[in-house]
Structure formats: C-alpha cells, structure tokens
Image (cartoon, rainbow, N blue to C red):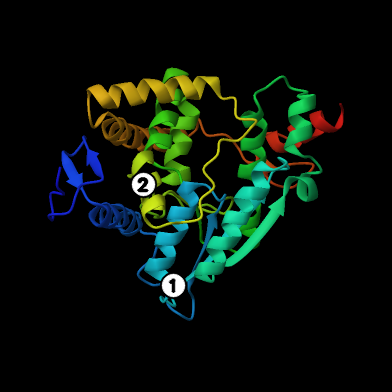
Amino acid sequence: MDCDKCDREAVHHAAYSGAHLCGTHLRESVEKRVRRRVREDGLLPRDATPEDPERWVIGLSGGKDSVVLTRILDETFAEDPRVEMIALSIHEGIEGYRDESLAACEELVERLDVRHETVTYEEELGVRMDDVVQDDPEDMAACAYCGVFRRDLLEEYAAEFDADKLLTGHNLDDEAQTALMNFLEGDVTQVAKHFDASLGPFDERRESEHFVPRAKPLRDVPEKEVALYAHLRDLPAHITECPHSSEAYRGEIRELLLKLEENHPGTRHSIMAGYEELSGLVAEEYRGEGGADLSECERCGSTTVRDVCRKCRLVEAVEAV
C-alpha cells in the first residue's frame, strides 16, 4: 500500500483516521501533533522573551516516549532564545535496567547538547527499588511505590530548577488507560487532578504556588506511532520493560483498549475527548468547598493534604523493615 501523500510505500496504517503513511509523512504527522499540542496548551506564553525565557524540565527516562518528546522539543526550540530546556532523569536503583536506559539518555543529550541532570532514589530518599521490592512493607505492587517516589522527585527538582513547566512523555495509550482505570475505580479525585496536573491551556485557573504546572505534549499520539517514530529517527531509546513491573490491572486495561481500538478505531481518542471535558468540570467543583486544604509535610516540607506526605510514609515503612 502506498502512502496517501506520496508514492512511497506506507509503513503505518492509522485505522482511526484511515491514513496510510510512509516513514517521512509519519514523522511529520507525529511532529505536527506535538507542536500543535504545545501551541494549543499555551506552553510558550506570548510574553516570553529572551530576557525572561520559559524554563521547561523534561522527564527523560530513556524510554521511547521521553526520548521522542525531547528530540521533537529540541528540534523545535533549540534555537529559540525564549525557551530553556533541562532533561531530568531519575535512577530508581534497579540494577542493570536503569543503567542501560540512562546510557540512552546520555547518548541523546550529547547529540542534542541539552542540559542533563540525574537524581537517584538512594541519594534523595535513602531507598533503592530493588530493596523495596524485596521487602515490600506495604504489600503493594512495585509500581505503586515507584510512581509516588518518581513523581515527588520530578516535582521537587522542577521546583528547584525554577521551572515554569514540567513536561512528561505520556502518550495517548497511557492517558486513555489511566482515564478508564480512574473511571472504573470511581476515583473522582484523580479525575479532577488530571485537569489541574496535565491539561492546558495554562491560565489563571491552573496557576498554583504549590506545584509546577505539568504538560504532556505527546498525549495525542498513539504508543505505536511513538515507537515507529523512534525507530525511523534512529533515536537511542531503551525499549525494555522494567523487571519489577507488575501492574496487572493496568495490563488488563491495556489489552481491553487495544481490542476495542482494533474493533472500533478511534476509541482512545473518544475516551480522552470526553474525559478531558469531564475532568475540567470536576476540577471546578473540587476547587470549591469540597477541596482539601494543603499544608507542608512535617518530614520533608512538600505540599500535602496530610501531616506526612505519601512519599515520606512509604519511605518510613521501608526504613522500618
């Protein structure tokens, strides 16, 4: 099958749109959607200047999503004096796995000449995921610990670097899975947080002195297209599943969505269109009397709704083993 836009052979069929695309036009399609999302979410304010540039911290894990995001953003803004970018990688203490992905990060930032910072669970929290998994004091999946620790460090260092935005490489599949999980679990709080944490445009409704605003410029791009883009551009992505990954429920949701998408192309886009509108409505409600009061964690000083934040409670549990 030929590409819809030229006479080259198609490498991908996007069933949700009906498009057949060659490598060149797939690359252009992915880049166009990321740049459109940056524009529509207002990541670069009109009043940004070279004298007062926007500073973006990009969560760079070395996986395909964060590598593709970093590459596209660099290609778009490397010569724009209104934007400064810092790639932030986190070493969880997973022997072998994270070392290889950090090597991919280092290769990428060397190619792009992007400032790169790395922090570790061991230095910052006094824990290593290999040990946490072995001890498992809370009897939880490894991802439950790791997700809390990683989010906390991303937020902490984004604030330390005085970032205006924290960007992560969540793709369309990631977002649709999370949306469906939150809905099936009846987790209205997370529905509200989805809007405040990750959706644009960045206006007065979302400004907060407590958190660095987040953005997900890849959220319109399916996972398969991200992977193809990384392959076509020969990017140094580390595409290997974490050895501690055990989110069985998310795996079930992932398989369900893939089947639905196969039978009903466009399902992921439809889920997100409705979910994002719903999350905005719920977020407005939760900013009223029902919103929780924020305070400082007694142990680390981070913002929390409890006396001790979730991260510190998990670290204390690990230390007590």
Q: Position of residue 200 (x, y in %)?
A: 37, 50
Amino acid type of disc 1?
A: Ala
SS at circle 1: loop
Q: Which is nearer the N-term, disc 2 or disc 1?
A: 1
Asked whether disc 2 touches disc 1, contact meaning CB atoms under 8 Å apart, the reply is no
**Res 115 → quadrant:** bottom right
Residue at 78% from the left image edge and 41% from the top image edge: 298
Q: Is residue 143 above or below residue 56?
A: above
**In the image, what residue occupies the spot 67% across and 57% down?**
118
Is residue 70 left or right of 6 when viewed as pictured?
A: right
Circle 1 residue = 78
Q: Compare residues 45 and 226 and report the one nearer the observer.
A: 226
**Residue at image coords 50%, 69%:** 112
Q: In the displayed structure, does residue 223 sit left or right of residue 249?
A: left
Question: Is disc 1 surrounded by few (<14), some (14 to 19) or many (20+) residues within 10 Å?
Answer: some
Secondary structure found at label 2: helix
Residue where numbered disc 2 is placed: 228
Q: Is 307 situated above or below 212?
A: above
* Residue 255 placement: quadrant: top left
Give coordinates of residue 166: x percent, y percent: 52, 54
Q: Please state which amino acid type lies under the numbered disc 2.
A: Leu
Foreground mark, 2 or 1?
A: 2
Foreground pick, 28 / 215: 28
Residue 120 locus on image (x, y percent)? 73, 50
State which quarter of the image contains the C terminus: top right
Residue at image position (51%, 43%) is: 239
Examine the rendering and report whether any part of residue 136 can be seen: yes
Marker disc for residue 235: none
Asked whether, in this view, residue 52 is left or right of residue 277, the answer is right
